Amino acid sequence: MSAVTPITDATFQAEVIESELPVVVDIWAAWCGPCRAIAPILDQLAGEYAGRVKIVKVDADQNPGTVTAAGVTSIPTLGFYRDGERVDVLIGAHPKPVYIAKIEELLA
């Protein structure tokens, strides 16, 4: 079972903007190879950072409102949110150490 929580346009406000924890939002699609490649990494990180950071995923095809609001033009796109504000963004697939560094920055 994945530690990454799927969210939708309808739950974005409650799960991300109103979250007491910092949040990493993975905007992905089932047909996206790089999205599928990073999914296991994000799942590992969700477990490693449980209780400190929430990692959620938004299916770009089923949630156009979130995609448009975030200004996403390419996937995967990861948004890093603290106190309801997006403070950083990472586009494309990267090795695990890159995600760890971004999460550590989010926690700093």
Image (cartoon, rainbow, N blue to C red):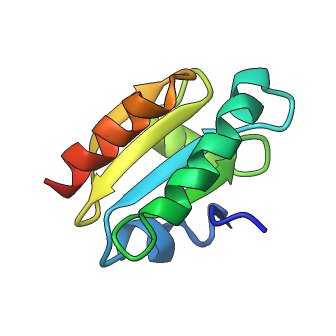
Q: Position of residue 99 (x, y in %)?
A: 42, 37
Question: Which residue does the image show at 72% across and 63% down from the upper left?
Answer: 2
Q: Residue 6, can we see it?
A: yes
Q: Is residue 55 visible?
A: no
Locate residue 2 relative to residue 98 in the image: left or right.
right
52 lies left or right of 8:
left
Residue at image x 49%, y 33%?
96
Asked if 90 appears above or below 30 in the picture, the reply is: above
Instruction: Residue 38: name its quadrant.
Output: top right
Where's residue 13, x and y in %? 46, 70
Count of numbered tags? 0
Q: Residue furthest left?
A: 108
Quarter holding the N terminus is: bottom right
In this view, the residue farthest toward the right is 31
Q: Residue at (54%, 21%) from the top-left corner? A: 92
Tell me which residue sits at (38%, 65%) in the image. Answer: 53
Where residue 93 sits in the image (x, y, percent)?
57, 23
- The one nearer the camera, 1 or 64, is 1
Q: Is residue 49 left or right of residue 30?
A: left
Which of the 4 image quadrants contains residue 40? top right
Picture quadrant where residue 100 is located: top left
Counting from the top left corner in percent of width and height, residue 87 is at 24, 44
Q: Nearer the viewer, residue 76 or 1?
A: 1
